[in-house]
Image (cartoon, helix red, strand yellow):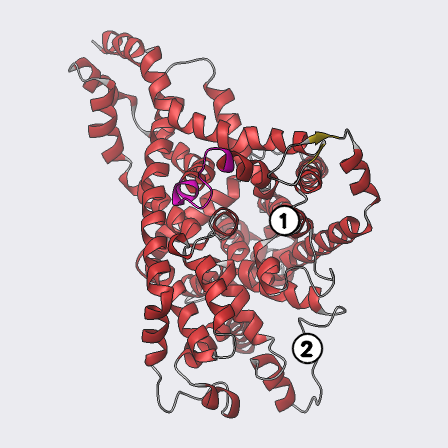
Amino acid sequence: MGRIGYILLYTCLALVAAFQIFPLLWLVLFSLKDNAQIFSGSPFALPSDPQFGNYLNVWQGGIGLYFFNSVWITGLAIVLTVLFASMATFAITRMNWKLNKFVLGLFMVGLMIPIHSALIPLFSMFLSVNLIDNPLSIVLTYTTYNLPITIMILLGFYYTLPREIEEAAVMDGSSINRLFFTIILPMTTPVMATTVIINMIYNWNEFVFVNTFISSDEYKTLTVGIQNFIGQYMTDWGSIGATLVISIIPVLLAFLFFSNKVVEGISSSAVKG
Amino acid sequence: MQSLGASEMNKVMSNKLMITLYIFPALFLIAVLIIVPLILTGYYGLMDWNGIGSMTFIGMENYINAIQDAAFWDSAWHSLLLALFSTLSLVIYLAVSMILASKIKGADLLRKIYLIPMLLSSVAIAQLWIKVYNPANGILNTILRGIGIENPPSWLANPDVVLYAIFIPILWQYAGFYILIYYAALKNIPESLIESAKIDGANPLQIAYKIKLPLIMGVVKVTIVLAIVGSLKYFDLIYVMTGGGPSGSSEVMASYMYDLAFSTNNFGYGSAIGFLLLIITLIVTIIIRKLTASKEDIQY
């Protein structure tokens, strides 16, 4: 291929990259401006007098609480999902029982269905056990709805674990619990890391469950919180921008440090899903 | 020794109590919070119910109403348009991936840059694009006025363009995802195949179309299923950006269902729509898989 060909191809790829990045750059820029600068200046001008106060104001104005809720709900659901998914995957791939393929098939139903079809019954079930407007409803749904994808990612790794290690442990008189918690789980650390990060992204970004089950401000997570918050600050672009930047920073940081894990998790979840 | 170990292990690994303990948490949660609600949706669809009071059995009335409901079919049509658009945009993603996978320096970094929007919440994406489309100060109209277009439209308030205006951020959100998948598949093609085609005098376009594309067809078929099914159940971004408006012009099936139940308390009818959404998604999935099935053994 000629030199001009390469230049054309690179231009093409750079244009796609620009399309993907420009809205975000613009977001960061206007999060540091006040309305006067946003409405009169060029959209890509650097903020002449950076308004870091935008960030402080929205953090103290309620975003800090939503952020905290997102952190603990995301974290708790990750621990439960990865633990339960690892136990189930261990039972399905390593233990001897007849219905294992059937149960696996049942789990995989969760990958295909539109979650909205389950929303109304979920709402009425939580209502009947007093879990509406209780963060436990969110933790339970996040844990459950991420199980299928997490099991999917774990499966391949568990199938490749050598039987000999288990045999040796069993010969040494190790119980199943000790085998699972002290030998198998540590061996699956790399794939667990992938599932943790995929779960983190899903939980952090989830919207519809919180929007449906939670009504009190004190339990709202960032996604629903910023939705209400932006309603209040409708005309103050700087505050809206700062709110959005705060909400996306954790995921971007995770991507910056663990991008290979993210890529691995997303592609393994997709190609089979 | 080896066989003794194996039989000992078989015994330990067949312990019914331990199997139950290990499978129970996941199985219980999935059964109670996924499988049971899906069945209940169909059942609630047979009821007249406001979500809080008592239910009255009304037979198939909700389902019959849904089939005659123009607003439902409008929303289904919009979902179908989105599915069509998503499938067509796969061609663009495929072309970009082909370029990216052809020994481009920095390909790894570029595909990660492309992936960034996919990692953001739909709420953040929606709020950002509401600003992009802002008629007075949004970046789109600022640029359009800059190049001499006097009266650019109010993208999200105009019923004629709103649906297409929403498609763009959806494309923005998923581009990196599909490029990632295609890129991985293309990188799996043995270099020797490409080399021998070059020696036979094939040009880059022929190589792309006649060699690379057939070799990754299995993955392409999977992405077609993902794009169509994903579109049929799409909700978040549309719900936040327009709430289905103005006057239903950007309503999709899931947002129509959601509004019926949680805005107008019509839980019975909403459940019927939710059940139809489930059935339509399953039927479409089966049809596409049948249509795209081939002799190769593709595991979804």
Q: Between A14 and A207, which is closer to the camera in this rendering?
A: A207
Residue A219: image location, x then y, percent: 39, 52
Image quadrant holding the N terminus of chain B, namely top left
Q: Nearer the viewer, residue A206 or B13?
A: A206
Residue tagged by mark 2? B154
| Numbered badge on residue B80 | none
Query: In the rendering, at what x and y percent does residue B251 appear?
Result: 70, 57
The amino acid beneath tag 1 is Tyr
- Disc 1 marks which residue? B258
Query: Is A172 left or right of A86, judged from the image as shown?
Result: left
Q: Which residues are magenta?
A: A127-139
Q: Position of residue A6 (x, y in %)?
A: 52, 73
The answer to whether residue A255 is left or right of residue B123 is left
Q: Amino acid at mark 2?
A: Ser
Q: Between residues A56 and A149, which one lies in front from this camera angle?
A: A56
Provide residue A236's location: percent of width, then percent of height. 47, 79
* Mark 2, secondary structure of its residue: loop
The reply to whether residue A113 is in sight is no
Q: Earlier in the sequence, mark 2 or mark 1?
A: 2
Above/below status of A21 relative to B188: below
Vertical arrangement, residue A166 with respect to residue B168, above or below = above
